[in-house]
Image: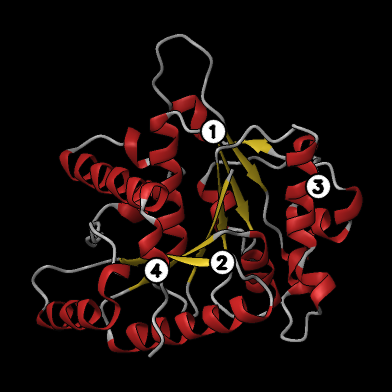
Amino acid sequence: MQVVSISSLKGGVGKTSVTLGLASAALSAGIPTLVIDLDPHADATTGLAVRASDVLDIGHLIKGSRKAELAANVVPSGWLSAHKHDGGPLPVLDVAMGSAFSGIYDRPDLGRRDLRRLATVLARADRDGSAPYQLVLIDCPPSLNGLTRMAWTASSRVLLVAEPGLFSVAGTQRTLRAIELFRTEFAPALTAAGIVANRVRSGSNEHTYRLSEMKTLFGDLLLSPTIPEQANWQQIQGAAHPIHQWPGESAKSASALFDNLLDSVLNQSATRSRLYRG
């Protein structure tokens, strides 16, 4: 079970959009996947077409982590109804629902015991065989407070999302330094899965310049492909629909990019686990 945190310390760069794109690619590929919506805004939960349910949200699961039953409290994504399949069993795309309640842990002073709450929930499910997932995607809040650090503690990799802009590039540098420090103190197995350049505008001189800067700064950590700005992305998300099932050539092209990105995240070699130490 590969556990990947999707993170950015700067809001508004499309972190949740990348999470949803990867989830759509995993669904299309038939990879059993769990999306954990750790952002108190719960946008990933909405985007995955999850209806209100009487199961425990992720905030309450991590509060009672020692007795939490993950399998009994995940909800199938509403995307499954739109998924094209050959009549066999549907692939697995489950959601641990986000809620504002998880915000009680989004503090800068979270202790080591609390940082392990999400890891404990996942470990319990893994031990009893109730979590049939090959991939877990954790949508983190855009901060370095307790919830993001809790996600990093539970993860083997962190995927960073950045726009090719000055403040986002600087924020990515800070995030990589934060991962290095966090790994040293709390999670020695944690590595960077790479950096996704998102919302790239091909006609923008500023974006062209910043992409070149990112290649210089981050080297192999900058993943290919980059994700261009998608004109109808808000419409797709507003419909709570997987991009792989959205009509039109632009959605088809974007789906192929997320397929390649998912492959990069899952199949990168160990030599790409180095971190930037700028």
Mark 1, other Cα within 10 Å: few <14 / some 14–19 / many ≥20: many
The residue at which mark 4 appears reads as 161
The first of marks 2 and 4 along the sequence is 4
Q: Position of residue 198 (x, y in %)?
A: 30, 66
Neighbour tally class for label 3: few under 14, some 14-19, many 20 plus, Cα within 10 Å: many
N-terminal-most mark, 1 or 3: 1
Label 4 to label 1, Cα distance in Å?
23 Å
**Drawn side of residue 229 relative to residue 67, left or right:** left
Where is mark 3, residue-wise? 56
SS at badge 3: loop
Q: Say which residue appears at 68% left-offset and 37% top-offset.
A: 75
Label pair 3/2, CB-CB below 8 angstroms? no
Q: Residues within 10 Å of mark 4 (few under 14, many from 20)?
A: many
Residue at the image position 54 percent from the left and 54 percent from the top: 44
- Tag 2: amino acid: Leu
Which dot marks residue 190? 2
